[in-house]
Image (cartoon, grey):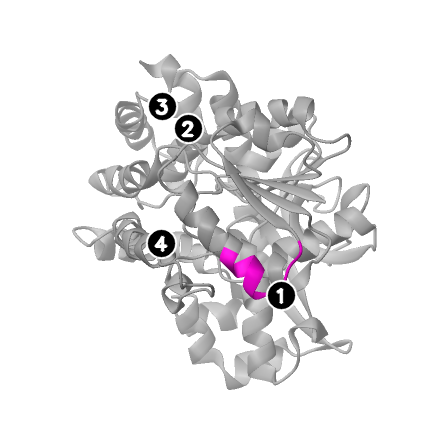
Amino acid sequence: MKIAVVGGGSTYTPELIDGFARLDATVTEIALIDPAADRLPVVGGFAQRIFRRHGHPGQITWTTDLDAGLTDADVVIIQLRVGGQRARISDETFPLECGCVGQETTGAGGLAKALRTVPVVLDVAERARRRAAPGAWIVNFTNPTGIVTRALLDAGHRAVGLCNVAIGFQRRFAALLGVAPGQVTLDHVGLNHLTWERGVHVDGVDRLPELLSTHLDGIADAVSLPPAILTTLGAVPSYYLRYFYRHDQVVEQDRGAPTRGEKVAELEGALLSMYADPALDTKPDLLAHRGGAYYSEAAVGLIGSLRSGDGATHPVNVRNDGTLPFLPDDAVIEVGSRVDADGATPLPVRPVGPHLSGLISHVSGYEELAVHAAVSGGRQRVYQALLAHPLVGQHDLADSLTDRLLAANTAHLRWAA
């Protein structure tokens, strides 16, 4: 099996490589594709050493030629970042000037990233359709994952969206309960970066009430939310819900503080220096601070099910198709899904109450408009998407943010020049 990784020059690529080195001997080649010619030999060389250390028989290759890297790939993983950390820092700062949260996957910053990213990902997917092996799957890890995955599915591609939030919760809860991660099944529901854990099942028993009773403060601290929110909901929101439940406090905290993009840019320099060491053949501890924890295990498991057709359950981004009756069928949701050689089919979920369904519906409507804006362009579509977003939702804010967003991204949005 050949896997093509678009955005393979990323500093968290070694996390992905380590997972395949440990867990999947069926891989014959991983082709790292990236326009950053200076990074590729550093990341690729380190990846080779990781494979060798684990005695993996596959090979690591790298190229700046997208078509060459995609040729004959059985699976295409997309993890690119259009504009690099500089664009991310912009996403995280210009909304703050208007009193809105600055974050690269939600609000105005998330829309900016979607507008830059969707056209590039669709181009990659079209080229994969021509170059990759027949029936190849696209696994999208590129943020904003729900929006990007919806654009891929709308264009008719064989795609599944993947996020590491659910597997992170699974591992955390398993450790708290003293059981193996594989014994834990989550009632994971929502949209990408807008999810809640409504149940933590071990051997058919929901252990979430126990977790909220004995570990409430620690879990609340991990998601940066007050414990009262978790007890009121009877669920554990993802870390990203803090941007909704504590929006104004987050804005005040972030104003004048270093952005996540600035911190990551610094981390990347240190990591690349480590990767260049020819003696290094294991992941450095510093990589854990880069993000993407357990991404490799999630990716290996998902790809294994797509290839083998084993029907295992994976939390993925997939068409709604009636799963959440308050959303259109073509919406993209993030829920536990049965995955086989035909793709991902969402499993039935218990009813979602209005304390969650209202916000899910609101953000899903925004995401639909965001896809239209990313695919078709135009200031009016950008404004409409921002006006529909629950973190913006006012004319003056949407109007001002639209102009700031377009000004900050002129180089990436040719229609906005």
x then y, percent, for residue 282: 47, 66
* Residue at x 27% of width, y 23% of height: 403
> How many other residues sit within 10 Å of disc 1, few (<14), some (14-19) or many (≥20)?
many
Residue 164 appears anywhere in the view:
no
The quarter of the rendered structure image containing the C terminus is top left
The residue where tag 3 is placed is 412
Q: Nearer the viewer, mark 2 or mark 4?
A: 4
Residue type highlighted by circle 3: His
* Label 3 neighbour load within 10 Å: few <14, some 14-19, many 20+: some
Q: Residue at x 57, y 71 (%)?
A: 171
Mark 1: amino acid: Arg
Residue position for label 4: 276
Give the amino acid type for the residue marked by disc 4 in the picture.
Ala
Label 1: state its secondary structure: strand
Judged left or right of residue 403, residue 369 is: right
For label 1, the residue is 198
Disc 2 target residue: 116
Label located before the other in sequence (1 or 3) = 1
Q: Which stretch did the figure color magenta?
A: 49-57
Q: Secondary structure at mark 4?
A: loop
CB within 8 Å, label 3 to label 2: yes
Of 343 and 108, the residue lying toward us: 343
Choose between 71 and 7: the one closer to the eye. Answer: 71
